[in-house]
Amino acid sequence: MTDFIQLFINGLAIGGVYALAAIGFVIVYSATGVVNFAAGQFVMFGTFAGVAMLLNAELPWPVGYGAALLAMALFGALFFAVLYLPLRKSPVVTIIIGTVAIGITMQNAALLAFGSWPFRLPSPVEGVNLTIAGATISAHAIAVVVVTAVMVALLWLLFFRTSLGIGMRAVAQDIQAARLMGLKVNRLLALSWVLAALLAGIAGLMLGPMWFADTSMGDPIALKAFAATIIGGFGSLPGAIVGGLFVGLSEVLGASYVSSAYKDLISFGIMIVFLLVRPQGVFGERVQDRG
Amino acid sequence: MRMTRQEFLKALLAAAAMPWAAAARAQQGSPIVVGATVPMTGPLSLTGKQYHNSLMMAEEDINKAGGINGRNLKIMFEDTQASNSTAVNAFVKLAQETKPALFFLSSYSTQNLAVAPELKKVQVPAFYAGGADAVAESGNEWMFRVRPADSVSAEGMVQCALNVLKAKKPGILYIQNDFGQGGAQTAAKRFEAAGVTVAGMEAYGQNDKDFSAQLLGLRGKGVDVILIFNYPQDGALVLRQAKLLGLKMPLVTSSAALVPAALQLLSPADLDGVWGVVDTFIDPAVGGRMQDFVERYKTKFGTDPDPYGLAYYDGAMLAAEGLRKAGTDPKALRDWLAAVKDWRGIGHVYSYDAKGNGVFDLAVVKSKTGTKSLELVQAIKLN
Amino acid sequence: MSMRFPLLLGIVILIAGLGLSMLLTDYHLRLLNLAVISAIAVIGLNFAFGYAGLISLGHAAFVGTGAYGVALLTTLLGWSPWLALPVAVAGTAIFAVLIGLPLLRLKGHYLALATLGLNVSFSMVAANWIELTGGTNGISRIPELQVAGHALADERSYLWFALAVLAVSAAVAGLIHASRHGRAMIAVRDDETAASMTGIDVTRVKIAAFVLSSIYAAVAGGLFACHMRFISPEDFSYAHSITYLAMLIVGGEGSIVGAILGALLLTFLPEWLRFLGSAYLAFFGVFVLAILVFLPSGLVGFRWPGSLRRDGRSKGPAMVAASKEVRP
């Protein structure tokens, strides 16, 4: 039982990070129709923004986290202006390959800037362990679960209680209608990129202390976030959350109770089964070939 | 052939006192070219950088000491990246364009295996540092290993678990690649031969970042020691997560988790109760050539040398001696290398067997409590 | 389009390749071999992606199936490579049918993600099924190909053989493109509903394109195994699938000549740019992106203003133009 508690909390924490990455991915997809294959590199950028602010610039953590997130928000806006706008009219395959190419560039730009040696990004609650029912649990894992929950609550408030968020939902539903209703569509589209970058930044900052920060960490996260999105349902926010937590838990519990060698095959296997049997996922859109 | 410290210092002084004479001699004739294909970019450059550094340092030292019978030694580098195909391209490029008298290959077994057929075509001796036994078993008579084979390391880890830690129910955790799979299998067989049952074996993928399931699984099986076969970064992460999960049993890690690149990621607390089997215990305190090497390496490159890098340095020195004595004829050089017995490098004693394995000694180390420095527990010599 | 173009293409490939094989040194011959092998795989990808519009991020898995097939049949069962090659290709085709039947109901990014998942799963199984695949240690000592008692051991003679295979592959691809089946694929890509209205069996056409692409991939994989004589899971990771796709995009999707040009360029480019070191991949990403934005029909789509198009019969570009013209 103690083992199960430890595994469960760990799985939740990892799942929380996947969920945040998946939410960012879904927000961009719903608003702009872009399937962002560079989503994993966004998270990696978030971790390295933390490395730059906390380790290189040696800022105290509240300031450093703020600066890192600010940098990520700027990056999201830049991405919108420099990459999204020129590519937005292209066919879906071009956008997929384009974001793959952007991801490769992002990863290797980070490699050039930070080198191949990994970094140890400290957590604000570094070294604090809690004992719950005999299970040792790091305070950081709990913090990750809490932050994920808070972020989900904030997003809900944004999308359902502010005019900004309602506008974003309107754009996601029907961009023409939104434009006709006088919404500043471009601004809302930009905002969705900024939001995605911010969420990836938060995921990255939380991930840094759990793993080491290295520039090749993006791809594995992306694969898991994709699986989470498919399982939860493409374009669905609750789906991204449920999918992320599910992938995180299945990874940790699957490695423990099924096979550690094939644990990733479990989440991909479930993803492929979902694609074949229920491509709209648990909560997702009905149309199969949107975009 | 054993050099005392005094003799060594004398030789060094002599070399320092007559740089001009030596340089003048060395300039006669064209340089002797040696090719080196090492991972200088990409994820494997974490360790590859060390080989690059130590080979450059060896080249400089050899030429300062008069080169190869008056001719300079020139090492030409090409990058293998993290790809087998690129490794072969790099090798063919060097073989084609510079016609080296000898090669240094990378320390990644799959790259060694990929290059082996090409090497056989080119017919030039090559040093390599991949540990997989499969490389030696493939029976390529041109290949010479400068490090202990993985089975030797695994055997050393088993001995540490049995003799030093008195393990009764060992567990094994390994990375899913040639190194981890081979090492874990060898270790399991050795435990079995010693009449000890392995209580649990767990694996993880090369890109995995979370090991809680594997570590807790092993703990759940009641293991009293965990043997860990790892690469540098994941090795460091395993050690750290073991502490985060509250594992108390001693851990015996393979050497990768104890190289400087991995140690910089760990805190003293992470290393509490960690044992390891390293190729060479790098300790400047033993003095002599070891101290000289460590200090000069640090001054030159700003980082600590690791045992793999040292193996390449030794390999280069051995190569230089071979080139002096047997000349650049590939066949003669190969035969000379195959006949090397009890050649004393800084890190190892080299004696080549019929399969091109030359190193059979290792060191068991453990972290000093509360620090990140390692101490020697015992040296192991295997047959 | 007549039958002339495919034959001409095959002959041009043979002549150009033979000429080059006489001029180049071993290192460049080796790169040319790799490029020719990649070109076969990319021509295959062109069926699925260029003609039928099926985006696949799992092409390397089929190259790997072919390569592992040849490697296992020759090393475990001691078969001759000449027997192993067709069997491995046939096995891959069956595998592709089994995978394609359920998977090809998906489109767009769903298909992209599913094929990506397929490739990741393939690597995982190849790395972990140690008893069969040797795990990450791979399979070494794959025998050399023999032609009339002469081993294709050196780069030059292997290149002649690989060129012959490429020439035939390209010619056959050209014939298929010009046939009713090729047109059906393009019709399906452009508008599925319209295609099915004209009596095209959309599912069958998609499966056919997918299986054709896997057959070419398996041929390339078999050639790769016999050339390297060592394979390991790393050689067939999804990163290679992305490279194949990039070769097609850079060369020009929907074009056989483009597939060959892209494979050539992206095989030689990293070697020419060795001096860039770590910066190469960053450059690669920007390069592919620039092609996508500024030259969406790839290198073969490049036109010097006002030339070449005048006479609609000019070889390579004309063919691309033909395939482009049916595109909205």
Image (tube, grey):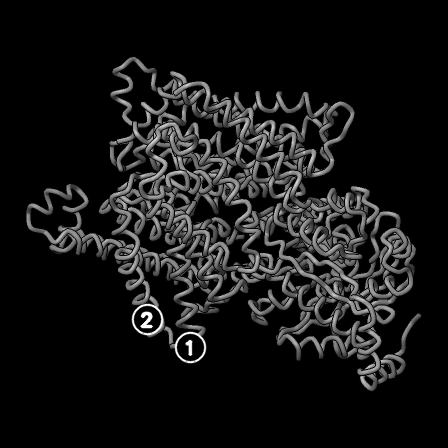
Q: On the image, numbered disc 2 is attached to which residue?
A: A67
Residue A263 visible, this orientation: no
Tell me the quarter of the image containing the C terminus of chain B: bottom right
Q: Residues within 10 Å of mark 1 (few under 14, many from 20)?
A: few
**Of residues C170 and B364, which is closer to you in this image?**
C170
* Quarter in which the N terminus of chain B is drawn: bottom right
Residue drawn at x 72%, y 32% is C152
Q: Is residue C90 above or below residue B262?
A: above
Q: What is the C-alpha distance between the residues marked 2 and 1? A: 12 Å
Specify the subunit that label 2 lies on. Answer: A
Q: Is residue B63 left or right of residue A84?
A: right
Q: Residue shown at 83%/79% (left/top)? A: B22
**Residue B174 point in image, percent of width and height:** 63, 50
| Secondary element at tag 1 | loop
Q: Is residue B40 left or right of residue A268?
A: right
Check the residue under mark 1 and report the chain it is in.
A
Amino acid bearing label 1: Glu
Residue that mark 1 sits on: A58
Residue at 44 percent across and 42 percent down: it is C246
Which of the marked residues, 2 or 1, is nearer the chain's N terminus?
1
B187 up-or-down from C231: above or below: below
Q: Quadrant of residue B247?
A: bottom right
Front residue of this view, candidates C161 and B84:
C161
Q: Residues within 10 Å of mark 2 (few under 14, many from 20)?
A: some
Q: Quadrant of residue B248?
A: bottom right
Residue that extends furthest to the bottom in the rendered view of this protein: B17
Q: Amino acid at mark 2?
A: Ala
Outermost residue toward the top in this view: C199
Q: Determine whether label 2 and label 1 are within 8 Å by CB.
A: no
